[in-house]
Amino acid sequence: MLLCHFSTCCQVRRKMEDENRKARRVQRREYLDNVRELVAFVKKRDKRMVKFQVRRLERARTCFSLLHVGREVHVKKRSSLVGAACRSAIDVHGQVLQVIQHALT
């Protein structure tokens, strides 16, 4: 009889703990949502934030333009290297063909 009463108490306690855990989770979520809303409200009205966003946009544009210029330089450099490699390969093949033709005659 004592064992049955003890297990019932444990079951009740576990259910209470589960309910409390769920309630804490809901309260934590509501609190974090309120904090996010407050931060968004303050950001929207803070003039420093507007200046920061403008600076960040300018910085992003500068980085994008530098990357674009860097890519153009890289493509030009690579195409010149590829062109030089092709020319040297053609020269080597031409020399090989001359040697073969000379050997056949």
Image (cartoon, grey):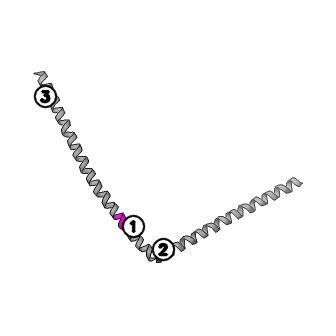
Query: Which quarter of the figure is the C terminus placed in?
Result: top left
Going from N to C along the chain, the mark reached first, 1 or 3, is 1
Which of 20/1 is in front?
A: 20
Magenta range is: 57-61
Q: Is residue 60 magenta?
A: yes
Mark 3 touching mark 2, by CB under 8 A?
A: no
Residue 95 lies in quadrant: top left
| 81 in relation to 69, above or below | above
Q: Quadrant of residue 69?
A: bottom left
- The residue singled out by tag 2 in the image is 43
Dot 2 amino acid type: Lys
Which dot marks residue 98?
3
Residue appearing at x 26%, y 47% in the figure:
78
Q: Which mark is residue 99?
A: none
Q: Nearer the viewer, residue 35 or 63?
A: 63
Question: Which quarter of the figure is the N terminus placed in?
Answer: bottom right
Most common secondary structure along the magenta stretch:
helix
Task: Give the residue at mark 1.
Answer: 56
How far apart are the alpha carbons under marks 1 and 2? 15 Å
| Quarter of the image where one finds residue 54 | bottom left
Task: Name the front one of labels 3 and 2.
Answer: 2
Q: Amino acid at mark 1?
A: Arg
Q: Is residue 94 left or right of residue 76?
A: left
Q: Of 52 and 96, which appears nearest the observer?
A: 52
